[in-house]
Image (spheres, rainbow, N blue to C red):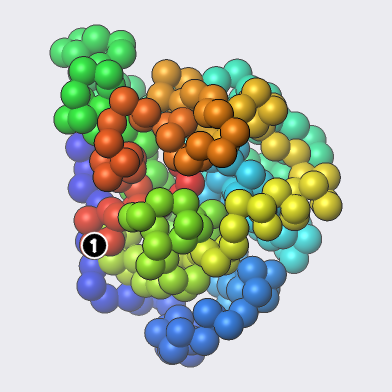
């Protein structure tokens, strides 16, 4: 499996004034729209939104970015195990915004080797088996995309109150796990209610499974509905303890994120 491009240095193509702003922490006082406007102005077209199409955060950001720049880039990871409702939503978004969605796939040979060794549904057997599946179907493809798509920045829908592992998320940071590009987290300080207010006020298309009780929708076998008032993350990998429920995409020098 290809290792992510670890770098304690910023990517060389990023200009010094941009780096200075990121390092200054000044973005913490800016709104989501202000951060996206700054990011598009300084980094487009070498910036792309990571949208899972399974959580309202990514769709709200897609709508905001599109209003700022109709040519803004968005990519989605197709793990091969997504529910039909997510594929339907990708097409609805393409039609609504007339926007090309870049689709990232796992390596067929890696999926074939894992399935041959562990079967089609290895994720329920152990944390190690589940993490291997996430590595093959999520982490490696996104790492590869970020390394090969010639980006200086990516945008995520991470929020601080989603999980204990995300409580320190800054609005702008250098992503050492992905070659020193900039990771833009414009709604890091938003609540779930704020996201839903934005989505409803702007008629942003969202995943139909939310109406069936799914707060976030990932792969079909690893997502389920939750009861009102339950922790939204409890609908993902519910058979594991809370401290292991990350796919590995968003983890400091050894981790990556995207709401994927
Ligand atoms: S969420 Fe489940 S099916 Fe999807 S990559 Fe992870 S373990 Fe595999």
**Residue 47: x and y, percent?**
54, 62
Hey, which quadrant is residue 69 in on the image? bottom right
Tell me the residue at 49%/23% (across/down): 224
Dot 1: element: loop
**Residue 205: x and y, percent?**
75, 39
Task: Say whether residue 160 is left or right of residue 210.
Answer: left
Tell me the residue at 23%/72% (across/down): 8
The answer to which of 119 and 246 lies nearer the viewer is 246
Tell me the residue at 64%/31% (across/down): 210
Residue 200 visible at all = yes
Task: Say whether residue 153 is left or right of residue 4.
Answer: right
* In the image, residue 198 above or below residue 130: below
**Residue 107: x and y, percent?**
33, 29
* In the image, residue 64 above or below residue 44: above
Hey, which quadrant is residue 125 in on the image? top left
Q: Which residue is mark 1?
A: 253
- For the residue carrying disc 1, how many other residues have a C-alpha within 10 Å: few (<14), some (14-19), or many (20+)? few
* In the image, residue 111 above or below residue 168: above
Residue 151 visible at all = no
- Total labels: the figure holds 1
Task: Say whether residue 210 is left or right of residue 23.
Answer: right
What is the quadrant of the N terminus in the image? Answer: top left
* In the image, residue 236 above or below residue 29: above
- Report the residue that reaches farthest toward the front: 229
**Residue 27: x and y, percent?**
54, 80
């Amino acid at each position: 499996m290809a290792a992510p491009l670890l770098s304690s240095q910023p990517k060389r193509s990023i200009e010094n004034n941009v780096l200075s702003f990121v390092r200054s922490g000044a973005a913490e006082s800016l709104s989501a729209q202000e951060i996206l406007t700054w990011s598009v102005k300084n980094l487009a077209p070498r910036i792309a939104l990571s949208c899972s199409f399974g959580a309202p955060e990514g769709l709200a950001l897609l709508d905001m970015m599109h209003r700022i720049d109709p040519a803004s880039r968005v990519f989605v990871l197709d793990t091969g195990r997504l529910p039909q409702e997510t594929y339907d939503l990708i097409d609805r978004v393409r039609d609504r915004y007339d926007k090309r969605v870049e689709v990232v796939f796992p390596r067929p040979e890696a999926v074939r080797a894992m399935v041959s060794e562990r079967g089609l549904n290895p994720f329920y057997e152990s944390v190690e088996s589940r993490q291997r599946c996430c590595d093959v179907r999520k982490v490696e493809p996104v790492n590869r995309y970020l390394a090969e798509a010639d980006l200086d920045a990516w945008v995520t829908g991470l929020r601080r109150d989603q999980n204990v592992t995300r409580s320190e998320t800054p609005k702008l940071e250098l992503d050492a796990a992905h070659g020193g590009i900039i990771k833009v987290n414009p709604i890091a300080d938003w609540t779930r209610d704020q996201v839903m207010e934005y989505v409803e006020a702007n008629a942003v298309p969202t995943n139909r499974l939310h109406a069936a009780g799914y707060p976030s929708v990932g792969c079909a076998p690893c997502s389920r509905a939750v009861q009102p008032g339950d922790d939204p993350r409890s609908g993902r990998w519910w058979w594991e303890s809370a401290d292991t429920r990350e796919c590995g995409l968003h983890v400091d020098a050894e981790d990556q994120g995207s709401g994927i």
